[in-house]
Amino acid sequence: MPYRSPLSELRFHLDHVAGVQRLGQTARFAEATPDTVEAVLTEAARLCDDVLAPLNRAGDLHPARLENGVVRTSPGFDAGYRAIADGGWIGLAADPRWGGAGLPLTLATAVNDMMSGACLALQLNPLMTQGQIEALQHHASPDLQALYLPRLVSGEWSGTMNLTEAQAGSDVGALRARAEPLGDGTYAITGEKIYITWADNDFTGNVVHMVLARLPDGAPGTKGISLFLVPKFLPDGQGRPGERNALRPLKLEHKLGLHGSPTAVMAYEGAKGWLVGPPHGGMAAMFTMMNNARLGVGVQGIGVAEAAFQQALDWATTRRQGRTDGSGAIVEHADVRRMLAHMKADTFAARAIALDCAVALDMAQATGDAQWAARAAFLTPIAKAFGTDVGHEVADLGIQVHGGMGFIEETGAAQFARDVRVTRIYEGTNGIQALDLVGRKLSDGGEAAHRLIDEIEKTASEARLSHPALAEPLWQAAESLREATDGLLTRPGDRAAGATAYLRAFARILGARAHLRAAMAGDGGRARLAAFYIRRLLPEHASLLTEVRDGAEGVLAVTPTDLSA
Amino acid sequence: MPYRSPLSELRFHLDHVAGVQRLGQTARFAEATPDTVEAVLTEAARLCDDVLAPLNRAGDLHPARLENGVVRTSPGFDAGYRAIADGGWIGLAADPRWGGAGLPLTLATAVNDMMSGACLALQLNPLMTQGQIEALQHHASPDLQALYLPRLVSGEWSGTMNLTEAQAGSDVGALRARAEPLGDGTYAITGEKIYITWADNDFTGNVVHMVLARLPDGAPGTKGISLFLVPKFLPDGQGRPGERNALRPLKLEHKLGLHGSPTAVMAYEGAKGWLVGPPHGGMAAMFTMMNNARLGVGVQGIGVAEAAFQQALDWATTRRQGRTDGSGAIVEHADVRRMLAHMKADTFAARAIALDCAVALDMAQATGDAQWAARAAFLTPIAKAFGTDVGHEVADLGIQVHGGMGFIEETGAAQFARDVRVTRIYEGTNGIQALDLVGRKLSDGGEAAHRLIDEIEKTASEARLSHPALAEPLWQAAESLREATDGLLTRPGDRAAGATAYLRAFARILGARAHLRAAMAGDGGRARLAAFYIRRLLPEHASLLTEVRDGAEGVLAVTPTDLSA
């Protein structure tokens, strides 16, 4: 069954769960009227359903490949990319000064959701560019902005991030790439970077690499790292791609999934680069790019979950088993129904969290209010980790719903799981997200966490009369979460060992709140799905919080020697 | 890092958890002395480590292929198979009358564990033959036994199971294959079967297919199904492969994993076959084969979990991140340690359950005691589903431990997850296992379940003084399990909706009992791993049992229309 963008689902989320209306009431996003939102969604859905989704299988079967130093992309990807760029989708949330539409990130997030479900491998390309646009808008010099931003926003050129080196993954501070000043304000960048997503292609006029490297006087560790813009072709006086820069893809990786997205090892051999942000200020600039990208990656998981769910549901309603006369579709079996309800309920929860995060980012931008910014910062690692975990879990359940056919590649069920798997790893593994949550994001003394828990309890209070059987467990769960949060605040040494469980418990409970809001605002179907989630999925929070309370001792007691015994 | 068979772990399991000693005390298995057990394990480990493990990657990179109607296997698989056959490993538990060693299935289970970790795709071939040997030993005529069993036991010929058809998967009763009597005691078999594992190869002299088909007077549904033996080559008067039978592989599937194992669509075009068991008695005979195979498949999951754990641990102890001076291996990070402890603790639990099931099967055979048989029957679906779920979860955690490298195929971490994924589907999906558990296996009024729960509580009682902090939660969990079991017994309509959760909760609690026994019998490392499991993994049982109690209503309330809204 072909992918169909979940338009009515997204409309419901925006209107009744995320509360997109409040954005339209700000001066910054006054143009985001209901009509505009609707027009954007329907137009994006047409692109996703008609142009992008048909490319998904070809990207898997015909991976991007490196031929004589040049990347050849999968069949149809060039036309697909052109449709994305020409539709103005890359710059949907970018500053109008550079050609962007200046619309809320919330809307761009909904569009990225649909594009991810349609063709993740291709969608990853503009997602990287969007992160780069964000970083350049905040940190680049006016000259660099004027030269690069219009071309990135239009999609004429595309962008990449170059952080990782063989010895420096989650530990970015261990990087060795060097930047030597050339005396004319530019730098010679030398080093080798790995896992470079969409490092090259055969459909944009230039590829702009953002590269972390160390200046000669850079301190060891993360404090001595600077960020450089290093284009594949050096722009000439008119801003046209000119001389080839001293950089090249050395090889493409053979990956579990996302075959349509070329992942390269990149060599910089004295390539000319420009500093972005202050010397030794690379990490801050990179985080701008990564925070944006982290939400975007969480949404990738949700998009794939949607696509995998649609396909599994279609299979389950057409595949007949268990009746001699062949009348019973497998969706009638309780265990299959359970899997499908789980898939739909968790996709809903993850999507609600991501859109909540996007609204907070938009409100922070529109109002300058630090509370919105803190909320967005707190929700970002949750949106990333839970969105991608759900993406993988839902895709995996989709395989199971297909039975034996799930293991056969031609159904595409396995491709969803293979493609989405990396989203739990890149842009900071989900373990790193959890450490960010219990570390940096609790460093405000728990203020942002408590504010969210207050909101959850407020929703539970509001629903107490209309949905008592759902409101009470949510209230109880929120209280447990509050206690666990306070426990982590008083026992910082226990944070790392409980981080992953804490993040997931928080997500589970935020998801329950979103379901309860949906039950209050929506029809009986919303209420039944909310009841399924709260009765059968929410209870997981209890064992997760047990893990959080267990602390570091129980984990670290198992020594490396015990493990290898 | 190359795979190393977990010899000391298996010795500990056999001696201190499964209690293999009691087998040696029976007349039937008197030959299974400690010396024999040790010799078998060490010899099997040598085969696995030196011969089979080096083939695993080649099987993935160079899939079996169909060329002009003939299957060409992966490089080295012929020699690997020959080593398995020549070592007498296929007939380890087979009757000495047919050339088998007549040793306990428990020992064969330990060997299958090691072989699965070394090279799952190849190990699957003798596993299928072992199931066929079991079925022929129980159900075939003396003539068929004398002709086929010695050749299957020696590995000269190999065996397959042919159940599934395109419209008949979990619903075997919907099959359409026909068997026409030829008047000479043989039958002409016609039909198309799918998902036929190791349907053909280029290293055994014959391939013996066990095919489910319907006789002309067969009733619709499962009651009218008969089982036939259909060889690729018709044996001549001396039992040598003679004339080609009218059957052929039509195509090989392109699968997510297990590329080294050819999975075919098979066409039977009036192929000559022999009845095994009585007319219309095919399901009973097939279940003999499948029950044996279900335990074997559970063990496949465990073997892969072991291999994935070993590789992840090696990576985590050599990969350095997070210290500027590069001194800290990632195993020092709490979240990585947590993942590795989880992998090891769950592999232990699943292995203990599988070996417990194998011992029960052996004791049933040795003593004829129906209680042992009932115990084995109850544990089989748990061993299958939990073993394979753990196999996949552990392999998936292994990917995560590898970070970005986990997504790159050359590390092999992804291959473990791809290969093992199908074990959750074949030989009855894990959902079917759960339905078997709450259906057929509770049809004794809960006797087998309660007997197991009694044993769990007995262990908890015994540990109350020595390990109070571990014994108490186990006791409580067992009591909850007892209540949930009684609930299912009184509300049969709720069984299907709670089946998967019930099976997993039972496994979680059986696993805790095994860990507690290990803590009592083993060193401090065993006790620390047991504490990790009981404190951090066992609590999952509570939310699972909440699901069980929730019943059918909450699941079925979400209608297909709600799902597609």
Image (cartoon, coloured by chain):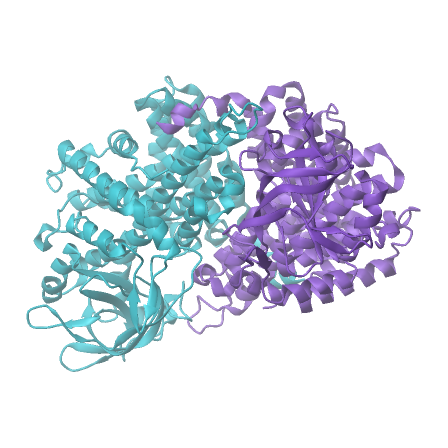
Chain colours: A cyan, B purple
Q: Which residue is drawn at 70% across and 42% down?
A: B272
Q: In which quarter of the image is the N terminus of chain B?
A: bottom right
Residue for point 68% across, 33% down: B180
Q: Which residue lies furthest to the bottom in this view?
A: A183
* Residue B229: image location, x then y, percent: 72, 42
Q: Report how many numbered discs are placed on residues in the image.
A: 0
Q: Position of residue A255 (x, y in %)?
A: 43, 60
Q: Quick check: can you spot residue A448?
A: yes
Q: Residue furthest right?
A: B27
Q: In this view, does B433 lie to the left or right of B412?
A: right
The part of the image, by quadrant, that contains residue A34 is: top left
Vertical placement of A109 versus B261: above or below? above
Query: In front here: A287 or B119?
Result: B119
Query: Residue B159: image x %, image y %?
Result: 70, 49
Residue A444 visible somewhere in the drawing: no
Q: Which residue is drawn at 69% across and 64% down?
A: B48
Q: Which residue lies furthest to the top in this view?
A: A465
Residue at the extreme left: A238
Viewer-closest of B472 and B81 = B81
Q: In this view, does A511 lie to the left or right of A183?
A: right
Q: Residue B325: x and y, percent?
A: 44, 74
Q: In this view, does B276 lie above or below B129?
A: above
Image quarter (top left, top right, bottom left or bottom right) of the C terminus of chain B: top left
Q: Quadrant of residue A312?
A: top left
| Residue found 36% across the figure and 58% down from its top | A62
Of residues A124 and B185, the one nearer the viewer is B185
Q: In this view, does A206 lie to the left or right of A384?
A: left
Q: Is residue B471 above or below residue B37?
A: above
